Amino acid sequence: MQARLLPQGKLTELVNALIRDYEVIAPRDERSFARIDSAAEMDLRDEKPAMSLKEFFFPEREVLVSYRLGTSGVTLTEPSPDDAARVIFAARPCDAAALPILDPLFNWDYVDSSYVERRRNTAIVSVACDEPCDTCFCVSLGGSPAGTEGSDLLLTPLGSTYHVQIITERGGELVEQYAGLFEDSDEESERQRAQVEAASRSKIVKEVDIAGLDKTLDFHSPVWETVTQQCIDCGICTFLCPTCHCFDIQDEGSPDAGERVRIWDACTFYGYTKAHAGQPRPTHDRRYRQRIMHKFRYYPENFDRTLCVGCGRCITHCPVSIDLRQVLEAVKE
Amino acid sequence: MQEITDRIREEARRLLGEELVDVVIGYQQGWDETIATPCFAVQASQVDRLIFDERCTYNLARYLVGREGYLTSRFRPADEKPRVALVARPAAMRAIVGLIQEHQFKREDVYVLGIVDGTPVGIEPDVQVGQIQEDVAKQQEIRARIEELEALPASERWAWWRQEFTKCIRCYACRQVCPFCYCEECIVDENQPQWIGSSPLPRNNTSWNVIRAFHLVGRCINCGECERVCPVDIPLNLLNAKMAAEVEEVFGYVAGMDAEAVPALATFRVDDTDDFIM
């Protein structure tokens, strides 16, 4: 493992240095990550922000094309590419892990250039969670509170210092760029890092065994109806989910000028994929089933990955406290 | 609180055991000991799941109405309407009153296991299963926050709301949790014509939240569920509480108090004040 140490006192310095050179996105409050202009705006509380990182790669509203009707006809303008070099600082390992899961989808039969561009331009510096929330279950999805997937650097708090694990070449370059702030790691720090990860993992008490779910999830199970009775068909679980990626396309503006935009959509909405023939999933048991089947069966069939990182947001923020872990246990039986 | 739980279970056991109802909608333990979640008990063997304590705040009247509501579902033949018993906090009882006024169902369609707090609820529960304390502090806080906002110049107040609405992610949890948002098709989902833009631009978000507040005028019974569920913490209930105060002042009408009354905005009197028309 390639690693360095960052004294805790240098964290602010590092973030401010990054801000001078990059567009920096960091957790700003209990609600979301946001672009910050100073390290002081960063909020490193234990609880993860309600919104995941997905909006910085797959925005909630994205202009696909603008149109204007003039005397010489219609002018179409594509938005200029989002090519600012960005660093996401203090990402959650689960949020970072969501991105490699989404990559094959956005590079599938249609290569989504804006997503791909943003992925290419963005370095991700995660901070390991030493206090996982009671809804976290990343370990059940192959992740860890100190998981490295999707991150370029992983910082693990060791008290007076951060252990900095270099995961990718880009991560190594970032460390080189600010080499003066870092110190060499040593065996003791490596041992401490492993301890922090083990201690954090042990705090995740509620796990769910998803082995084989991609084969066994039963579309026709009568359980769907009972496990989804509470569901009120809002979009919280999908909008807050770092991996849910369904969208709708809308035209906004007047006949003379406007924009075609892509916006988030949710399979839990009644109007989702509604067409002339009606709503293919008219009741919420069918919509909720779609969400689960997509995450744990269809997506694995298509991309060999489960579309869930166990971040627990859908559990924490569900207005009626539906627990995905319990639902999965119930539908397995 | 344990007494209330016991009383609910006893009633539920009787109602289900004697086949007087098909389902008892109440609360059960959620994913950990700090969380409650709605419970739908359909047989006597399930009644021990039912609980009641300070965690049990959801307004369960929401499950009675709407496209898939127990009493109004359009996926069930009309002659198969289930007989429903509902554990109803004071706000849920007021919601039931409003829904009866709006002809969503009849009083006899729901067996009310009422929990009272001394505030008027507009109906007699079929069985009173418990008594709790009114959350006076919360109501005072709402009034104080409204006063605070009203002290601001209109432009600042507007700017403040615009900022709040900017946060909206259009998840529609506010609408979905609301017992009065039972429209067959919500105006925000209509697209021919599209009255309100679907994308989360500030102007669209403002339209959405303001129109929703207007649609609840004289109807909202102040359960506060919209504000509770909002994942981005928009203080939605302030809008509703302010509109309720206006309706009370202008028409002397308070929602959820009388199942026989005609709702303020569903009627007209020649002596209605018109001084709000500029």
Image (cartoon, coloured by chain):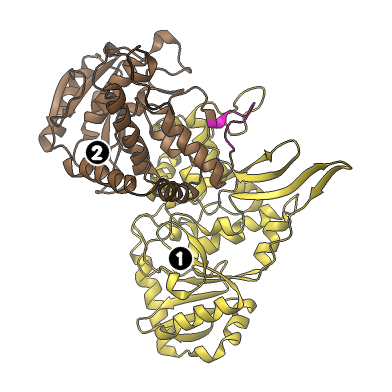
Chain colours: A yellow, B brown
Outermost residue toward the top?
B79
SS for tag 2? loop
Alpha carbon of mark 1 to alpha carbon of mark 2: how far? 33 Å
Q: Does the magenta stretch include residue B189?
A: yes
Q: Tag 2: residue type?
A: Cys
* Label tally: 2
Please name whichever residue, B162 or B132, is drawn nearer the observer in this view of the structure: B162
Q: In this view, does A186 lie above or below A67?
A: below
Q: On the picture, is A103 further left or further right than B182?
A: right
Q: Dot 1, how many residues are within 10 Å of its Cα: few (below 14), some (14-19), or many (20+)?
A: many
- Identify the image quadrant of residue B219: top left
Outermost residue toward the left?
B3
| Residue at mark 1 | A144
Q: Which residue is drawn at 46% across and 75% down?
A: A39
Predominant SS along the magenta part: loop
Q: Does the magenta stretch include residue B96?
A: no
Provide residue B3's location: percent of width, then percent of height.
10, 34
| Residue at mark 2 | B56
Instruction: Give the letter of the chain under mark 2.
Output: B
Instruction: Give the letter of the chain under mark 1.
Output: A
Q: What stretch is highlighted in magenta?
A: B188-197
Outermost residue toward the right?
A72
Q: Is residue B188 above or below residue B137?
A: above
Q: Residue at x 19, y 42 (%)?
A: B54
Q: In this view, does A97 lie above or below B74?
A: below
Q: Residue at x 60, y 85 (%)?
A: A177
